[in-house]
Amino acid sequence: MKKVVLLFFAVLTAFAAFGFAPAAAKTEPELVSSCKSAYLCDWRSGTAVYGKEELKHLPIASMCKIMTLVLCFDEIENGRLAADEAITVSEKASGMGGSQVFLETGGVYPAKELIKSICIASANDSCVAMAERIAGSETLFVKKMNERAKSLQMNNTEFVNCTGLPEAGQYSCAKDVAAMLAELLRHEEYFRYSKIWMDEIQHKGGRITEMANTNKLIRNYQGCDAGKTGYTSEAGFCLAASAERGNMRVVSVVIGAADSKTRFDNVKTMFDYAFANYTNRAVLEERVLDSAFCSVRGGKQKEVSVIPERASYIFCCKDDTDEIFYELSLDEVKAPVRRGDAVGTVTVYKNNVEADHLKLLANEDVEKSCYWDSLRDAARGWSL
């Protein structure tokens, strides 16, 4: 049997709708200029803040490598690829043009070094080497890229290669690029490489290729710690980047800027706009709830304290007010209970509309009661 507890939280600033709805009340029609397309959103909720032709099909150049990296980190997290695994570079991979780190045919490199060179130097040769390791060929890897895109509801994207080099039939849009960067940011391992400014990759025989991060904002914008540039004559100057301040992280995308400076300036403008006008308010923190306990049957104690599986935030305009509250639904569980077991749920509402839903976890172990525990409990009820 469940126990439902309704808790009023606060009157908070809020958005027109939580989730993927646009924040029309705060959007400036010409927030950025001199680009073909742009998009700005909250990372945690996906809430859109600004859009300019965000669904238009366009070439995105090396921003395609964001999906290449997503698949690389997927493989590592799923245990199918070790970061230290030695990868042998094929003739095709070493012969890639454009941005590269000049891998040698037959050369052997740790996977983490190839991944790092993609993050920092946008290395086409490393992309193909990783694609061949993960899927057997670039063609099969591209199939995986498109499957992963569909899983993220990237319905305006089609990959043809893993590098973003010009090729017929390849396109995406600013909103889809934001979605795949948001997915990449969920891989903590990615941040080991994304914030590196200068590094080098070593080749057999002592040869060294120096690398400089193509995302200049990690050096000159407070909170920017991730991103991917892109450029071809067809795509123009492109940039997808993310910045975090406090508990708010935003994602910004520019496609087809007139020049390199403009793409960085446009992304900075969108970042500034988001941090000046929006906030992420904590509704629930990841700590024990003082007023909530889950009943335990057959245990050495009759109830257990609970904790949310994660913090819950509401992304909202700073000057809007809305009613925020949450509802706890607590199960009656049977001992034994282990810390971390799911024992209920919590649903967060904004103006009576569901905004978030998460599990409640037991915060301690409760062992199963034995005969002597039952006898002791019975004795406590005796009166002389």
Image: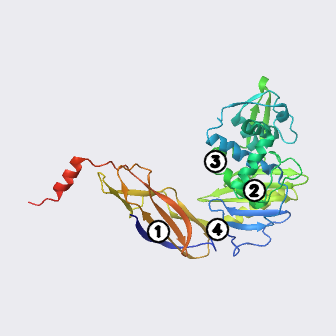
In the image, 111: left or right of 161? left
The residue where tag 4 is placed is 278
The residue where tag 2 is placed is 177
Give the Cα distance between marks 2 and 4: 22 Å
Q: Circle 3: is it few (<14), some (14-19), or many (20+) Cα within 10 Å? A: some
Counting from the top left corner in percent of width and height, residue 351 is at: 55, 76
Q: Secondary structure at mark 3?
A: loop
Q: Circle 1: is it few (<14), some (14-19), or many (20+) Cα within 10 Å? A: some
Counting from the top left corner in percent of width and height, residue 139 is at: 81, 42
Give the Cα distance between marks 1 and 4: 25 Å
Q: Secondary structure at mark 2?
A: helix
Give the Cα distance between marks 3 and 4: 25 Å
The amino acid sitting under disc 3 is His
The residue where tag 1 is placed is 327
Q: Which mark is residue 187?
A: 3
Counting from the top left corner in percent of width and height, residue 281 is at: 56, 66
The numbered mark, 1 or 2, whose residue comes first in the sequence reads 2
